[in-house]
Image: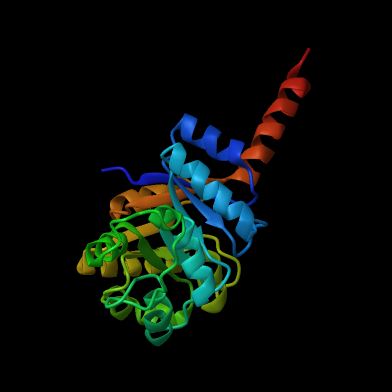
Amino acid sequence: MKPQPAFWLERPDLAACEIAALVGYSLVVLDMEHGTIGTEAADAIVAHCRAIRLTTYVRVAATDRLLIQQALDYGADGVVLPQIRDVAHATEACAYAKYPPLGTRGVGYSRTMNYGAYDGIDDAFFAVENARTVCHPMIETPGALRDVEAILALDTVDGVFIGPSDLSMTRGRGAFKFTAADQQDFRTVAAAARKANKVLGLPTPGAQAYALAVAEGAHYVTVCDDLTALRLGFAQGLQVAKDKP
């Protein structure tokens, strides 16, 4: 089975989400760590993506309780947590994404509860919300890679996503180039995800990485971002002009 095609959204652009959905993307990851999306914009983008049935994850800026709770209160389908150091860090951070007794997420009467008008808020609601929303810590540090099986064993973790550039840098290999060592890291994480029967998300910067993702059973892959798509589109347009007789 082919992985679900996903893209990064770096800037608050509703049209980019619509266009991506129209051409076949089914999942967007709002990048609030490296992008320029603020909290109010994220709230509007999540509502828009829900309306066009585009699965929406939010990569929060940091593993902060407030940021994780806000992303889920917007109605996002999940959160991606950056810079996880090890299993101890994952245990604390991922708990913020799940309501008690599973985790420590606080209760806020926002979009997910129809802004307080929802009359079905009971224990069953919280169990359903815990199952609906996913938490994917990123494997992008030596400690997280070392502890990947323990991280995936946490009840608050639904899957993992690899941060290839940071993982390559922090493991002393310099800039990410999808070397044999990089590929082995991908396979290590993939094997741990399969063992835990949890979701695997992989970045696929090229055809070789995509083929590995398919072979390793990735559930979703990020294949582009809004800024790269814009650059490639502009370049293609300019090429038409250059090719003109």
Judge whether residue 76 can be spotted in this image: no
How is this picture coloured? rainbow
- Vertical placement of 37 versus 230: above or below? below
x, y percentage for residue 50? 44, 43
Would you identify the image quadrant in which residue 234 lies? top right
Quadrant where the N terminus sits is top left
Judge whether residue 104 can be spotted in this image: yes
x, y percentage for residue 81? 47, 69
Circle count: 0
Which residue is at the front of the view, 207 or 65?
Answer: 65
Residue at screen point 63% across, 43% down: 13
Quadrant where the C terminus sits is top right
x, y percentage for residue 222? 47, 50
Residue at screen point 62% across, 52% down: 41
Would you identify the image quadrant in which residue 125 lies? bottom left
Residue at screen point 75% across, 28% down: 238
Q: For the view shown, which residue lies furthest in the top direction?
A: 245
- Vertical placement of 216 versus 4: above or below? below
Which residue is at the front of the view, 110 or 176?
Answer: 110
x, y percentage for residue 195? 21, 68
Which residue is at the front of the view, 209 or 228?
Answer: 228
With 168 as the anchor, is 114 left or right in this view? left
